[in-house]
């Protein structure tokens, strides 16, 4: 009998809900303080997961949840890129 494949679960930093990793987008801060979106989920640095939802990205922008979690100022471009990724997925 085959063991069911384990689905990696991650917590959205905005909604605090546990979701499969595929339903989230990872935002990373590296050692130099650069912030970028990691679509592979394998980049080095501190990662924060955000649910693939325009409402959640908007909430993250308003509450600065990502900034608190990654302890760095998040450029507006990151939020715009997140919205683009969600719209195109």
Image (spheres, helix red, strand yellow):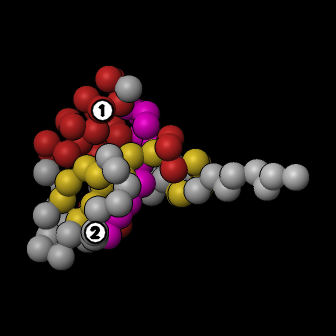
Question: Looking at this rendering, what residue extends furthest in the right direction?
Answer: 1
Q: Residue at x 14, y 70 (%)?
A: 33
Q: Which badge, 2 or 1, is on the more N-terminal residue?
A: 2
State which mark lies toward you, 2 or 1: 2
Q: What residue does disc 1 label?
A: 85
Towards the viewer: 37 or 12: 37
Task: Locate the C terminus and report the quarter of the image it occupies.
Answer: top left
Q: Residue at x 13, y 42 (%)?
A: 77
Question: What secondary structure is marked by label 2?
Answer: loop
Residue 21 appears in the rendering? yes
Q: Residue at x 30, y 32 (%)?
A: 85
Towards the viewer: 42 or 83: 42
Residue 65 appears in the rendering? no
Is 82 magenta? The answer is no
Q: What residue does disc 2 label?
A: 44
Q: Residue at x 42, y 54 (%)?
A: 49
Give percent across and percent down for residue 12: 49, 53
For residue 76, above or below residue 83 = below
Image side of residue 69 versus residue 36, left or right: right
Towards the viewer: 83 or 25: 25
Towards the viewer: 18 or 39: 39
Q: Which contiguous range is marked in magenta?
A: 46-56
**For mark 1, does the 10 Å Cα neighbourhood hold few (<14), some (14 to 19), or many (20 or more) residues?**
some
Give percent across and percent down for residue 74: 19, 56
For residue 80, above or below residue 62 = above
């Amino acid at each position: 009998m085959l063991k069911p494949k384990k689905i990696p679960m991650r917590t959205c930093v905005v909604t605090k809900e546990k979701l499969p990793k595929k339903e989230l987008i990872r935002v990373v801060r590296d050692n130099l303080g650069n912030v970028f979106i990691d679509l592979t989920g394998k980049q080095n640095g501190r990662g924060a997961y955000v649910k693939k939802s325009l409402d959640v990205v908007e909430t993250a922008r308003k509450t600065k949840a990502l900034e608190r979690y990654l302890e760095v100022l998040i450029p507006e471009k990151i939020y715009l890129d997140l919205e683009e990724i969600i719209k195109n997925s």
